[in-house]
Amino acid sequence: MPHGPIREVFPDVFFVTGTMKNEFFGSMWHFSRNMTIVRDGDELTLVNTVRLSPEGLAELDRLGRVVNVVRIGDMHGIDDAFYVDRYGATYWAMPGMSTDDRPQVAKQLVPGGEMPVRDSSLFAFTSTTRPEGILRLDREGGIMISCDSLQNWVGPDEFFDDSTIATMQKMNFFTETGIGLAWIHAGEPKADDFVRLKKLPFRHALCGHGEPAVGDVQPGYHAAFQRFFNV
C-alpha cells in the first residue's frame, strides 16, 4: 500500500509512514502507520514493519542489511513475514502475541533479556489483555519506539481516507503526545503500568502512529498519563 520516503530522524534511526486498512468498532478504517528502522554498523532492525514498494526496498537496501524484525505490539505485524522471508531476518516478539499469519518467533523479547539493538531496553506493559511494549534506545537522551501505546497523531495525513478522518476527529484521536484510544479499548491497560513508565527518562518518541515526537516530549506524555489514568 502507499507509503512515504524513508526519513533519517536521528543518526542511524529512520522512520517511514505507510498505510493501514482494518476494521475497528464495526466499520472499515483507512489510516497511517509507521515503521522505525535502527542501524548498527551495516545491520538494520525493523520495528513495526510496513511493507515497502520495490523502490522503497531498494532505498532500504542502500541503508544496510536487514537482520532483525521486531514486534512490540499485538495489533501490528501483518508485514513481518514478508521481511523475515525476504531477508532471512531473526524474528523477535513478546510472549503471548497472536500468531495468525505471523512468522515463528526465533527470539522472545522480554525485559532484561537479550535485545536486538545495542544500547536498548524493553518496557513491557503487564496489565494489558494483549502484549505491548516500548523499545527504548539509549541515544539522544532517550528515544522511545512505541507501537500503539504512545502516539503522536497531531492530524491526518495523505494516507487517510475522508470517512476515517471524520470518525477520528469526532472521537478525539488527533492529539499531540497522546495514548492510543483503540489500544486502550483493546488492551485495557491499568494505571500501574503508567506509574512504572513515568520513571523511564526519555526526550523523544517514534510511535507506530503519528509524526515523530522530537525534543523534550516526556512532559506531554506524562500529562496524557494523568488525563487517562490519574497518575
Image (cartoon, rainbow, N blue to C red):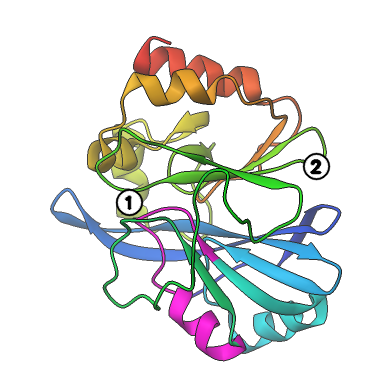
How far from the left and from the top, in percent, is residue 216?
A: 74, 24
Tell me, yes or no, whether the two marked residues, 1 and 2, touch with CB atoms within 8 Å: no
Q: Earlier in the sequence, mark 1 or mark 2?
A: 2
Q: Which residues are magenta?
A: 70-87
How far from the left and from the top, in percent, is residue 227?
A: 40, 14
Foreground residue, 181 or 13?
13
Mark 1 vs mark 2, foreground winner is 2
Tag 1: Cα neighbours inside 10 Å, few (<14), some, or many (≥20)?
some
Residue in the image at 56% along x and 90% along y: 86
Q: Disc 2 residue type?
A: Arg
Q: Would you identify the image quadrant in which residue 183 lies?
A: top left
Question: Which mark is on residue 164?
Answer: 1
How far from the left and from the top, in percent, is residue 80?
A: 47, 74
Q: Would you identify the image quadrant in which residue 205 lies?
A: top right
Residue in the image at 29% along x and 33% along y: 171
Q: Residue furthest front?
A: 113
**Residue identifier under label 2:** 139
Q: Would you identify the image quadrant in which residue 69 lies?
A: bottom right
Q: Look at the picture and state if 69 lies above or below 142.
A: below
User: Across the whole image, how many numbered discs are drawn on residues?
Assistant: 2
Q: What separation in Å lies between label 1 and label 2 (alpha carbons)?
A: 35 Å
Q: Is residue 43 left or right of residue 103?
A: right
